[in-house]
Image (cartoon, grey):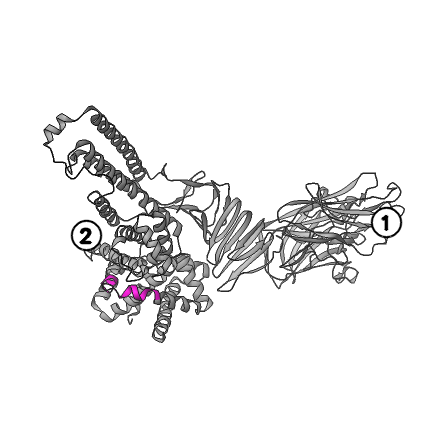
Amino acid sequence: MEHAEASLVEEARKGSHEAFSRIVRLHQAQVRGFLSRFVRNDDVVDDLAQETFLSAFRGLGGYKGDAALRTWLLSIARHTALRYLEDLRRRRSRETAGLDAELDLWLAEQAVDGSLEARHQKEMTALEACLKKLPPKSASLVAEFYYQRHPAVEIARMAGKKESAVWMALLRIREALRECVKTRLEMA
Amino acid sequence: MSDARVVDLWARHLADVPLDADDQAELRAALARNDEFRAEAMRDLSFDRMLRARYRASQDAEAFEHALFRTLEAERDATRFLRKVNAKLQASGGRGDRPIPALVALAALLGLAILVAVPRAPSTPVVEAHAGTAVVETTRPVAVPDAEPHAPVGEPARPERSAAAEEDEAARAEREALEKKLAEARAREQQALDEMLRRAQDGAPPATEAACGRVETATGDAFVLTRRGRGVARIGEALAEGDSVQTGAGSASLAFADGARADLAARSRLRVERGRLVVVAGQLTLRAPGPFVVAAPHGDATGSGAALRVDVARTSTRVEVLEGRARFGEIDVPGGHVATAIGTREPVVRMRTPERVAYGCAQAAEAATSLPIGREPGAAVSIRFRAPYTAAVPEVRLVFACGKGESSGSGGEVRVELREDGRVLAAALVRKPRAQGERAVAFDRPATVEAGRAYELVLANPDTNPRDNWISLRTLGGGRSGSPIVHAVEIAYRSAHGRAFVGPGYAEASPPVAIAGAARVRERIAVRGEDVHVTSVSVCVRRVGRPGPLTVRLEEAGGAVVEEAAIEPKSGAWTTVPFARPRTLRAGKTYHVVLSAPAGDRYEIVALAPGVGFKSPEIFVDGVAQATEGAAWEDLDGRKDFDWPLHFGVAPR
């Protein structure tokens, strides 16, 4: 752990909200991004992220500094997400849950061990590099759909394309990116 | 993925296109029965989540932090309060570690109320169960040994009945005060809860939620998206952090608490966040009297006291600074300049092309009036203008009129001053204006002007005998004739990102040409660059006698009529012919605007040519003035740079 971060943790342990606020600012993007891998609904992601930081604040006394603070926070985030999903599972059977919730559960089953925290940053770095290699049209489509949140139907309308062309293009772009990320991680 | 139908359903679902119940069932069944498909789908889903995570991480950060800190603050207050209650009870009641159960319950309720009342990110009912979990954990510190003083360790616990009997007057008063305080706090929290319940019931904007702006105007399809859902934008509707405004075919104007005003164009989306506006798509025009942050995919536009337009397109972000200056990412963008970031490339800054008010030659020699410069002592010619750029002005270009009645004697001298609010920014002296072949007048020092601010160009005659020695400034057009361009003065602007000349540019006129019978004139227009969307055509002619109607016809190069109208124009003034519907002049194609009239009395029209050395964008390079006596069409005087006073109205962007 870097010295500056260690002293922030130390101050936060003593009850400094200012220090904890700085920790939140440093890591909120990572934590929220990480939680987005478990849960699709953005509002739920933010709720879980809030829960993660509140738990971290209360549990700072138990943080020994063995792992990086980020890894520790991601670990709390994973547990928070799994607890939420477990709750979801108890409340609804898969048949009555929405398809998104069901897929969240499918995904969660693959993330019960702690390997995702370690992989997350590497994968995101590789993804960043791969996104830069996308052809302009594909990059534009990814930005429109994932960043600007344009519905696929609207993208199709504006581009004068069939809707199916848009969702199939997104599928193929994901496949291409996946291959690219896999190659990068293998080479690293 | 082998089954095309299932793959299509899968791709649709991840593209957020709703599946009906049957489709969902089909996809579920495929996921359940086909391990290979499920494994591949999970890999794809995992990647979809990675992409969402990548963009999610950068969004709504401030709103998230704000909500979290408010929750933390509330938790701290609740914890501190409960500790204090516990300590007070121990100290005043002398019951060791046995607090009064009702007060503890009350305190716990208060803690619960504070936490519930703290605005949180919207959640599904399931997540609200998590909020409940948090409350349970929040109450834990009550049991934790705290820093407040406890009752002395060695003091023996006394029976409850005898303790009450021995309670002295001061302790009772203190406890009553504490209970009163608790009751008041509970009432306040109850009020907050009631307000929350009312919000939930009627969907009205919360009174406690800080409204940071409101909808001023909304036309056509314009919507406000809040945590409560999406609704048609209503005039006066409050906007809070986290709300979005989206337009379809319509537009919306928003006003913010800090005095900023934002106009959202059609097919645009804007999100209001704490301390910043996020342009998700489309075009936003912002006028901010104070500091501002406009977030866009390629970076933040920041600054203070400026007007700017931000366009977010598929692969690019364009930041145009209309007034003041701003930064786009790490790059400084002066007023009148535009920064464009395309793809992953760094933004490039350049001077923007002044907004086109007309397509064609929008001056009229018919309205020419040469203005005497300082013929009367103390008299001067003043030309006011609004600077389109933040730039240096090293020179101006103008035309002196030396004909009969336009000058006298030596012509005097002409002092040219560039002023702002009466203060002279730069000056130049033209000693022998009659002999001036050159029309460029360089200032003693370049003045710096700011885009959007008003300035004045003042021309005076410092000659000792101005009544005998004077000269005129030649002007074309002007308010009297309704021309959108007023003066034949061109101002040079120079910045680190380029050089531009702004002004009408036209300065010289031909003798009048007749329009009657076989004598017709036309402007031949070869559209360059991009398509031009036009809504009307305006012409300026002079009547001689009582001619019949003037026919104005827009036709394609092959002669096909696009628009035609017969008008009775005023003499020497602009007459506008609106089109039945907007027309598009296609880039690369040639069109004609033909003016004709019956034989007999006639109309006259005067062609214009650009001034020597003038480079203004107002010079109509796409057009050529042509005339015919009945045979072939010929360029007027064989020149390619003459234009008829004729222009199209351009549809607004």
In front: B494, or B369?
Answer: B494
Query: Is residue B585 visible from the viewing direction of this image?
Result: yes
The residue that disc 2 covers is A91
Disc 1: which chain?
B
Q: Which residues are magenta?
A: A106-121
Nearest the viewer among B240 and A73 is A73
Quick check: B136 above or below B587? above
Of marks 2 and 1, the one in the foreground? 2
Q: Which amino acid, by three-letter code, is at mark 1?
A: Gly
The secondary element bearing badge 1 is classed as loop
Instruction: Please indicate whether residue B470 sits to the left or right of residue B502 in the image.
Output: right
Please tell me if label 2 and label 1 are on a single chain: no
Query: Crowding near pointer 2: few (<14 within 10 Å), some, many (20+)?
Result: few
Q: Is residue A110 magenta?
A: yes
The rendered magenta stretch, by its main secondary structure, is classed as helix
What amino acid type is highlighted by mark number 2?
Arg
Q: Chain of mark 2?
A: A
Q: Which mark is residue B403?
A: 1
CA separation in Å, label 2 and label 1: 95 Å
Q: Nearer the viewer, residue A64 or B552?
A: A64
State how many labels appear.
2
Q: Is residue A33 above or below residue B408?
A: below
Residue A112 location (% of width, % of height): 22, 63
**Residue B478 in the image, given as x and y percentages of width and height:** 72, 45
Q: Can you say which quadrant of the picture contains the N terminus of chain B?
A: bottom left
